[in-house]
Image (cartoon, grey):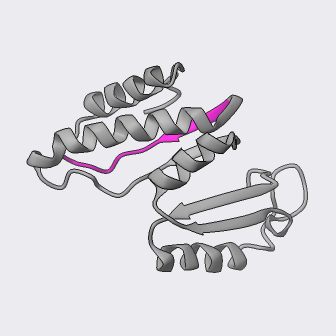
Amino acid sequence: ARGGASQVTSVDISAPATEAAMRNFGLNQDLPAKGGGTVAQCRHIPVAEDAFKFMRDAAESGEMFDVVIVDPPSMANKASLREVALRRYTELASLAVQLVKPGGKVVLASCSSRVSAEQFFAACQSGARQAGKSLKDIEE
């Protein structure tokens, strides 16, 4: 919203997290937004739903966004979950690139300490390729 977005959709499986996002959005209404105006001019759509389901449904319906930020919780809190986490990162990247408008941005994040940066980047690139797209590293 501060970046000048006209609409922000926040997706989290946790209803309390979505409620917190709504409260925080409300607390920031008077802050200036890029391009003039304030955060209050941005429509906030909170969605309490599994992000995988939301993204699949949005992709199937042709919904597109200027920016897609994917910041999941840790998916590999132990080494035995590394491969599962990598498959899920691949799927998230594939879904994310399907939802971004041409010229838009996809931001993918990981906080899984058992997954190296190289493994994470490779999984994201693989997911983008599966969707017929490519990713460009902007910053690590």
Quick check: 120 above or below 45?
above
Asked if 131 appears above or below 100 in the picture, the reply is above
What x and y, as percent, mark residue 27?
A: 69, 79
Between 8 and 59, the residue placed more toward the observer is 59
Residue 47 place in picture, x, y as percent:
59, 66
Residue drawn at point x = 64 percent, y = 36 percent: 100
Q: Is residue 134 left or right of residue 33?
A: left
Between 46 and 73, the residue placed more toward the observer is 46
**Magenta stretch holds residue 80:** no
User: Quadrant of the image for the C terminus?
Assistant: top left
The residue that appears at 43% across and 41% down in the rendered structure is 92
Q: Position of residue 136 (x, y in %)?
A: 52, 22
Identify whether 114 is placed above or below 46.
Answer: above
Q: Is residue 47 left or right of residue 39?
A: left
In the figure, is residue 74 to the left or right of 21? left
Q: Which of these two is toward me, 138 or 54?
A: 54
Identify the magenta region: 104-114
- Residue depicted at 40% across the width and 31% down the height: 124
Query: For the N terminus, which image quadrant?
Result: bottom right
Residue 84 position in % (x across, y down): 22, 43
Q: Is residue 34 visible?
A: yes
